[in-house]
Amino acid sequence: MRKLAFYTAFFLFFCQFTVNGQKINTDDVRFAGDSLAMGESIDPLSPAKATFYSAILPGLGQAYNKKYWKIPIVYAALGTGVYFYENNKHELDRYQDAYKQRIAGFPDEFDGQEGNPYVSEDGLLRAQDFYRKNRDLSIFITLGLYALNIIEANVDAHLDDRVFGKNLSLKPSLGLHPVENSAIAGINIKFDF
């Protein structure tokens, strides 16, 4: 019974701090129109527009969101996917042509004559399978990066800096642990709404 009374008193002691921490300061109360600078308004269709623009032309949604620094990243990602697709397609065509020539009885680039490396028919078939799989994989990765470009434009439009800029703060903090007398590093995140 004595432990129950101790735990109840301990719990009520900390609840009192929690309740006191929830008092509203009337100076901090803002109305919906006060969170933005004067004359600015938020377009509720901006996420849909950013998504549409980014689907039409990759990077255009990022330009609509005024995040111009993301456009080179989008094109570098998509360009890398297209590069690997073209490279694997070229290699697949080489091995397919060599296999077709060897089956027809003509010399090919991998027949081992005139300084060319020798690759067996089985090796030509395995190489075709390898480059076909890599070509298909690079198509799926490129399509995934294209979809990621669209999703990023949509999410970025939803998280508009004009809305969260004044209400969201992130500060590093340094404190002293009361029991161990050691330094504590942390991050304070504050969101006012």
Image: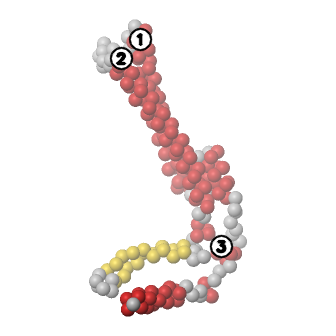
Near mark 2 (Cα within 10 A), the count class, few <14, some 14-19 or many ≥20, is some
Tell me the element at label 1.
helix
Image quarter of the N terminus:
bottom left
Q: Residue 4: x and y, percent?
A: 41, 88
* Disc 2 target residue: 121
Tell me the element at label 3.
loop
Q: Residue 143: which quarter of the image?
A: top right
Q: Is residue 88 visible?
A: no
- Identify the residue at image location x=55%, y=85%: 22
Mark 1 and mark 2 in contact (Cβ < 8 Å)?
yes
Q: Which mark is residue 36?
A: 3
- In this view, the residue in front, 168 or 20, is 20
Q: Determine whether, in the image, residue 170 is placed left or right of residue 157.
A: left
| Mark 2 / mark 1, whichever is N-terminal | 1
Mark 3 belongs to which amino acid? Leu
In the image, residue 47 sits, relative to residue 172, either above or below, namely above
- Identify the residue at image location x=33%, y=14%: 111
Seen as rendered, the residue at the extreme top is: 105
